[in-house]
Amino acid sequence: MAAPKLPQVLTANRLREGDVVYWNGSGWVADLQSARIYADKDDAAPALSAADDSVKARAVVNPYLFPVKADVRPIAPTEEREIIRAAGPSVRTDLGKQAKESFDVSI
């Protein structure tokens, strides 16, 4: 039996700083909770096209979709790589977005 398809979020890395960013439907944002959620790859086709334009403009690199649990808040990545990327650098918790008091790493 095939696993059920999970909703997806489009991510990339901002070329200038290397920061993880997410597509919110009209541009790139740093907060996963502000990302637009797509039902599947077909639903995300316009976003993937916009991501290609962003790559050509040298704004981001390596855009791709990843699965999330969208029925919970905060939105939760389902893969370890994306959990780490959403949390920020793993070497020093006093730097990056995880250093902000409002950042919640519980998933």
Image (spheres, rainbow, N blue to C red):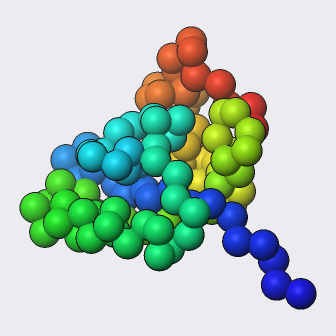
Q: How many marks?
A: 0
Pick the residue in front: 61 or 52: 52
Is residue 73 in view? yes
Q: Which residue lies at the image location 27% right of the left edge and 46% below the top edge?
A: 26
Q: Position of residue 68 (x, y in %)?
A: 65, 54
94 shown above or below 85: above
Which quadrant: the N terminus? bottom right
Q: Residue at x 61, y 48 (%)?
A: 84
Q: Is residue 21 visible?
A: no
Drawn side of residue 70 relative to residue 66, left or right = right
- Where is residue 70 drawn, in percent x and y? 67, 47
Q: Is residue 77 above or below residue 63?
A: above
Q: Determine the residue positioned at 71% across, 51% down.
A: 69
Which image quadrant is residue 87 in?
top right
Q: Which residue lies most toward the right here? A: 1
Asked whether, in this view, residue 59 is left or right of residue 95, the answer is: left
**Which quarter of the figure is the C terminus placed in?**
top right
Q: Position of residue 65 (x, y in %)?
A: 49, 66
Q: Nearer the viewer, residue 9 or 85?
A: 9
Tell me the residue at 58%/22% (across/down): 103
- From the viewer's perspective, tell me whether residue 13 is left or right of residue 17: right
> On screen, 84 above or below 1?
above
Residue 60 % position (x, y): 25, 57
Closer-to-camera residue (23/12)? 23
Q: Residue furthest top?
A: 101
Quarter of the image for residue 104 reads: top right
- Between 50 and 94, the residue placed more toward the observer is 50
